[in-house]
Amino acid sequence: MENKLTPYFLSFFLMLSLTSILSAQSLEEIDTIYVQTTRIPLKASETGRNISVIEGQDIQKMAVTSLDDLFRYIPGLEVQSRNAFGAQGDITMRGATFSQVLVLVDGMKLNDPLTAHFNSYIPVTPAEIDRIEVLRGAASALYGADAVGGVINIITKGYNNSQEAENRAEGQVNYGQHRLVNTQQGFSIRKDRLYAGGGFSMNQSDGEFIPEKVLEDATLEGYNNFFDIKTFGLSLGYQLNDKWRLQARTAYDSRNFSARYFYTTSPADKAVETARNWWNQISLSKTGLNSSTEFKLSYRNGTDRFVFSPDFPSTNLHATQFWNANVNHLRIINDDLSINVGGQLDRRDIESTDRGDHNDWHYGLYAMGVFRPGKALSLTTSLRLDHDDNYGLEFTPQLNVSYVLSALTFRASAGRSIRAADYTERYVSYKLENLTPGRNLGNPALAAERSWSEEIGLDYRPVKNWQLKATAFSRQSSNLIDYVLTNERDIANNQNLQAGADYLYATNIANVQTQGVELESWLSRPLGKQGRMSWSLGYTYLSTSNDDEVASVYLSSHARHLISTNLILETGKIELALNGLYKQRAGRLASAIDTRLDPDYQVWNIRLGYQLTAQFGLNLQVHNFFDEDYQDILGAPMPGRWVMGGLRFGL
């Protein structure tokens, strides 16, 4: 198959680009939001990094039904989904594996200690989101392990530090094909010293029917890729006095879905998975004239029940706990110098039928300084010292530079990052007896990953509220962890293996190099007195190689060429949202289940809204408008065209 964009894909981008250039006049300034993910609040142009901010009000209007869907269409992010509507997806950035992207909720680590496949189980409903900040590239000097490819920080309305009075309830209810029920509701109350808010979201469907396949030596029966996903959240905040503020949030996320071929391409795979996660966080902060101090504590409790097949005993049960405490102090010395210092302590626990029972302690100390010798130049230095039961003591530095010259911003960054193996990479299948060939097997002796990352970039604002961005980046990694087909004779922990059989064994791969380029366009402008257009377009090129040319599962699974776009048009009573994605990657074949991963695909979603009154409107949404037949993960087909419609409200 020839890898090329179809004519309608190219025509759309050319038309939209021309329209943007001709109409981008008299716009408001785009670079006024201070980002929180840098720990010291800075304008994006001052950070020296490639950072994007997605506003919560825009998320409600996009043609998406989950955070997985949303991330797929943010420039520079790739989500390798196993089903639509947020059932499960692996989040990657800049060629990093899904284990090397850090997810935060209100600045607190969310990454699952069992496996990074669960990092997309985010206990936040769309109605609760104030904004999402995406920092691309290494950030271990700020947040410690896992922040290799980038950071996604989801900031909820209760933690956005707004003081404006607010009383609002909003949501939508949609019904669609395959008995789909998609619903999102939320409320927020902000009055005087008190804030209260919450949300509920649900995606539930019988799923599409995947027909049976008749193979030469077996028949694979058909099945429905069903899903039932529910998330609840509740936030409370109280301004104790002029300086002290108390905030708390609790959330519960429940998922039950068909997981057939999510993790294997075995004909025996008939997997069903059920996951529950309970998230709690509390924060006490003091804000003075030139300083602020925060005390934060979060707790994640998760359970997972995985049944590989009902035809034979194959149930694995997992329970995890993750405690994370953080103290952070910011001091503004003068207009030119700000300093932030802090510490972190966390503990991870797991009880598992196939991985065993384990726990680890981790602590870190960090310091960050921002120096602005003049209005144009900003220098940011971060230093962090971490100790972990898995890798001992590690030092991670980071240096960022930005220089603003009228409409141009020059930026550069370099830093070190680390990541320790999760419990799955160390112990998966470790306690199972007589493990069948081809299964994943953990390695308790895995060393921690280490890497250095560099980037240079240029941001250009031809007019206000239109920003063009170009970034070149590189990463040199050692001891990267991935699964490599290995014979039983070469595996040290082979007590439960069949003689002479091959397994996908978790292995440290010596040296891996990644290079890439990101090109982006971000535009937001009014259309008349009651309209608005918001549009993003991004292209990412990636190349990954390893010195020994080892064939592994995940390191080279990312897209080589990735194009994504988001468009929101509002005019009068009509809203139009359009998402597009084109991906080109290495193709793969799984003959055992007669399926293939095509080397490229494109998918489009569209949403049309009509405002009946000031409070109520109608919604029509189509996912995969052109009914593309595609997969992100070999063996797990993504849904075809899916139509839904319903009612939206805002009170």
Image (spheres, rainbow, N blue to C red):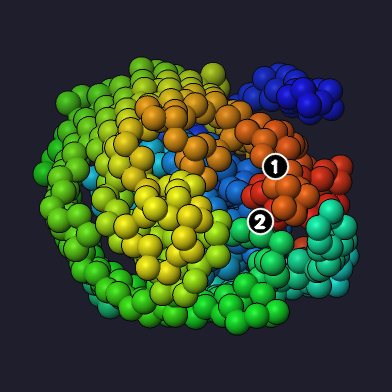
Left or right: residue 162 versus residue 419 is: right
Residue 520 in view here: no
Q: Earlier in the sequence, mark 2 or mark 1?
A: 2
Left or right: residue 110 versus residue 388 is: right
Q: Quadrant of residue 397?
A: top left
Q: Nearer the viewer, residue 246 or 429?
A: 429
Residue holding disc 2: 265
Q: Nearer the viewer, residue 51 or 67?
A: 67
Q: Residues within 10 Å of mark 1 (few under 14, many from 20)?
A: some
Q: Report x, y in % for residue 400.
A: 26, 31
- Amino acid type at mark 2: Thr
Q: CA distance from mark 2 to mark 1?
A: 10 Å
**Element type where label 2 sits in the image:** loop
Who's the residue at 42% across and 69% down the image?
A: 496
Q: Report x, y in % for residue 274.
A: 60, 77
Who's the residue at 55% across and 40% down the image?
A: 557
Which quadrant of the figure contains the N terminus? top right
**Element type where label 1 sits in the image:** strand
Which quadrant of the figure contains the C terminus? bottom right
Q: Report x, y in % for residue 60.
A: 66, 57
Q: Quadrant of residue 398?
A: top left
Q: Nearer the viewer, residue 469 or 222?
A: 222
Vertical order, 98 against 467 (above or below): below
Left or right: residue 244 versus residue 515 is: left
Q: Report x, y in % for residue 222.
A: 84, 66
- Amino acid type at mark 1: Leu
Mark number for residue 321?
none
Q: Residues within 10 Å of mark 2 (few under 14, many from 20)?
A: many
Mark number for residue 589?
1
Who's the residue at 84% across and 53% down the image?
A: 216
Who's the residue at 25% across and 38% down the image?
A: 416
